[in-house]
Amino acid sequence: RRYYQVRHKPLTVHSVEVKGNERTKAGLFAKVLEPIYRSGTLDDLRVRCLEANAVLHQYGIFEQVNILCDAGPREHPDCADVVVEVVEKKMLNLRGGAYVSQSREGSLELSAGLNNALGFAEKVDFEVIQGHERSSTYTLAWNQPRVGNSDVDVVTRAFQQVSCSKRLSSFAETSRGVSVSAAGGGPATIDYSLVWREIADPTR
């Protein structure tokens, strides 16, 4: 009830402090939290803090994001201090498993990922898929979310794929290439791929 009585009262933001960012660069927070300084009322501050919280979650690098607003120092009346507390996700991810495809080919899959290792919210993944015949796939991917503090995520991949089925064909197809995709900010997705394909007879 007290909030509704003062929510339209003018105020200024005295400071915004970030805690818990062990790897994440300060520049990432500066872009997201800058609108908070432009808050003109308590209700405006509430809305901008909720928006900043949602954007920080969109980076996918935090387990928790908590934003606390409190009164500023006594010598600065009608101002507020904002504290942003984050808990970063672990940096290294490892996964693995054995699978059988619809063509009855068994495969061993291993992947390793680095999450926000450089502090720019980037995600780097390396994946290896090895079939029990000659099939194999190697992929290195770099995912950069919210490029330039926009809604656009950019993923760059370099890959090599070898497809071979001894039961169906004596030829093996090898594909090597890079791809770049951008998505977000609308329903459209932009993809560009450059691939070199080579067909050979592995029995020769």
Image: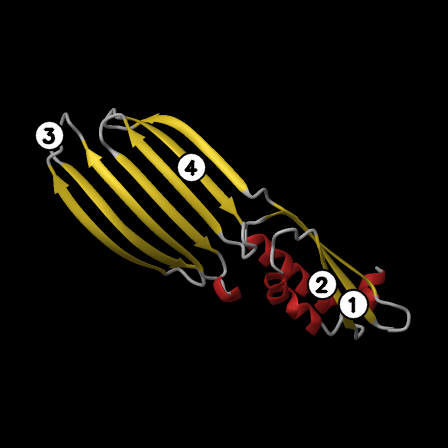
- x and y, in percent, of residue 125 in the image: 43, 44
Q: Earlier in the sequence, mark 1 or mark 2?
A: 1
Q: Amino acid at mark 4?
A: Ser
Q: Answer above or below: position of 66 versus 100.
A: below
Q: What's the residue at 54%, 49% (across, down)?
A: 117
Q: Earlier in the sequence, mark 2 or mark 4?
A: 2
Which of these two is toward me, 60 or 126?
Answer: 126
For residue 197, the mark is none
Q: Are marks 2 and 3 in contact (CB under 8 Å)?
A: no
For residue 203, the mark is 3
SS of the residue at dot 4?
A: strand
Q: CA distance from mark 2 to mark 3?
A: 68 Å
User: Disc 2 designates what residue?
Assistant: 46
Q: Which numbered mark, 2 or 4, is in the foreground of this view? A: 4
Q: Earlier in the sequence, mark 4 or mark 3?
A: 4
Q: Answer above or below: position of 44 versus 171.
A: below
Q: Are marks 1 and 2 in contact (CB under 8 Å)?
A: yes
User: Disc 4 designates what residue?
Assistant: 111
Q: Earlier in the sequence, mark 2 or mark 3?
A: 2
Which of these two is toward me, 76 or 50?
Answer: 76
User: Tag 3: Cα neighbours inside 10 Å, few (<14), some, or many (≥20)?
Assistant: few
Q: CA distance from mark 1 to mark 3?
A: 77 Å
Q: Earlier in the sequence, mark 1 or mark 3?
A: 1
Q: Which numbered mark, 1 or 4, is in the foreground of this view? A: 4
